[in-house]
Image: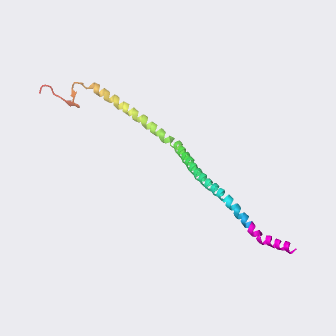
Amino acid sequence: MSDKFTESMYVLANEPSIALYRLQEHVRRSLPELVQHKTDMQSWEEQSQGAIYTVEYACSAVKSMTNSSLYFKNIDGLLRQAISLKEQIGSTQGRRKRALDPGMLKDGGEKHSSGI
């Protein structure tokens, strides 16, 4: 009976040590995998944040483009007006050149007198 008692006392005395040993063994085995998962998750989070920023920036650019349609319409009107004015100036200059005697103007528009 005293052997059984001694054995029981030995097991009870060493039970916490065995539990801590098992716990340490479990941590030692599983920790590298957990660290790898954590590293992977951090990498994915960084990639996700980059993608989210890119999408938000693209959405902002699209919104800016839709809001700028008024400016493009104004630019279109101004370009059409400039083209019309250029055509008017060109037609006026063409009439003026035809009205003048082509032999009277030489070398940049200076008049030459004949016979002096």
6, 24: nearer the viewer: 6
The quadrant of the rendering that contains the C terminus is top left
Q: Quadrant of residue 108?
A: top left
Taking the spot 68% from the left edge, 59% from the top edge, the residue there is 29
Query: Viewed as shown, does residue 94 lie left or right of 43?
Result: left
Q: Residue furthest front?
A: 3
Residue at position x 43%, y 38% from top? 78
Marks counted in the figure total 0
Where in the figure is residue 49, as x and y percent of width and height? 58, 52
78 drawn magenta = no
**Magenta stretch: dominant SS?**
helix
Q: Is residue 108 above or below residue 5?
A: above
**Most foreground residue, 84 or 39:** 39
Is residue 7 highlighted in magenta? yes
Image coordinates of residue 21 in percent, x first then y, are: 72, 66
Q: Position of residue 69 (x, y in %)?
A: 51, 40
| Residue 85 to residue 64: above or below | above
Residue 16: % across, % down: 75, 69
Tell me where the magenta segment starts and ends, as one range. Answer: 1-18
User: Residue extending furthest right?
Assistant: 1
Residue at the image point whose x is 76% and y is 70% from the top: 14
Quadrant containing the N terminus is bottom right
